[in-house]
Amino acid sequence: MENQANIYRQKKQRNIRNEKMKNLIKLFGILIILLVFAIYLKQSRERIPQKALIPKFDTQKASGIEIKTKNTDLELVKKDDTWMVEKPVQAKADINAVNELLDKLKAVNIGEVITDDKSKYHDYEVTEESGTVMTVSFKDKKPISIIFGKQGSSYQSIFLRYSDKKQVYLSFGMEKYILEKELKLWRDRQILKFKNDDIVSVAFQKKDGFEVIKSSEQWLINTGKKQHGAESIKVIEILNQLNNLIADDFYTVDSTTAIRITGLNEPVLKVIIKFNNNEEKEILFGKKDSQSRVYVSYKDMDPIYLIYEYTFTAINKKYSELTKQQEKK
């Protein structure tokens, strides 16, 4: 009896294992079919002819760009070969940001028509209320207006619609982050740009003010009373901070009271740089804002920049920190 019971249990276990194996084989087969179908679908889409979003797009002939969203109303205009921000403020544009956008627009291709049913526009975020409306103006042809909507399955695919057409397309080549940039990233944030070899002197006007003078291949510190040899490496470190000084943000001044808030009317530090072509630049460093960023501007106070505190600390050195060790003794 016991042997028969064991035989029965073993047979039952074999049947269970066989059933599990059959189920696994079925599941594996279904997965294979789904994978083949997905590959076929992808290849079918890839075989659909793609065309340029903006046919025969010459980026040099673009004369204006408008970008509108719920929170953004940006206008870029090309004036005498220089790109400017026209709205919401008037300022010089970041040429690298503009060129990146134009190059992306030129590279964007549109593939299959997803739908032309207006009731589905919200699903793809291609309405003027839900999408990003971009209008590109040209010197030699009519403007083109496009509504960029929801991101597709990849980071470089976006659903879009021409503003004057019904069809919703899946496009390839544009990233959402470019369309969603903050205003400050469209503005030119370069405060200073120069070559160290072109500098004759740098004056640091403050409580313990001093001037760094270039003599032949040496740097000297002039305190007004006497000159000291300067640590060239430390001077160059300061110059490297200055010669590619980039703003984190901008401060909008709407009154003379606002200028007092920045402290630029009584700067903590004034840097005067003289160059070998007789050019001179005077930069003012003021107080810190609520995020510990330092206000910076030229003497005309337009624009007023904000830089990180650590950048200012790297520039605002005492003369004792730059004096050669042997001369401190």
Image (spheres, grey):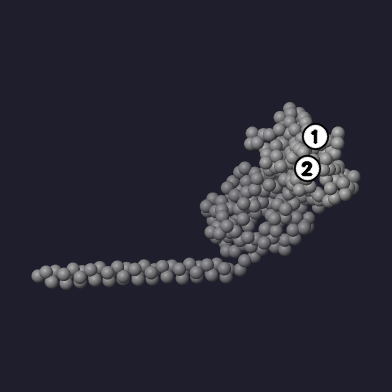
Give the residue drawn at x 73%, y 34%: 286
Give the residue drawn at x 38%, y 71%: 29
Quadrant in the picture for residue 108: bottom right
Return the residue nearer the eye: 268 or 250. Answer: 268
Asked if marks 1 and 2 touch (Cβ < 8 Å), the reply is no
Which is in the foreground here, disc 1 or disc 2?
Answer: 2
Q: From this viewpoint, which residue is outermost toward the top?
A: 257
Name the amino acid, label 2: Gln
Vertical order, 77 against 43 (above or below): above
Quadrant assignment for the N terminus: bottom left
Measured Cα–Cα span from mark 1 to mark 2: 21 Å
Disc number placed over residue 64 in the picture, else none: none
Vertical order, 147 against 204 (above or below): below
Name the amino acid, label 1: Gly
Please state if 231 lies on the left or on the right of 183 as rendered: right
Give the residue drawn at x 71%, y 42%: 314
Look at mark 2 in the image and give the residue it sits on.
326
- Give the structural element (helix, strand or loop) at label 1: loop
Return the residue nearer the eye: 313 or 176. Answer: 313
Residue 218 location in percent, x, y? 84, 48
Disc number placed over residue 209 in the picture, else none: 1
Return the residue nearer the eye: 238 or 21. Answer: 238
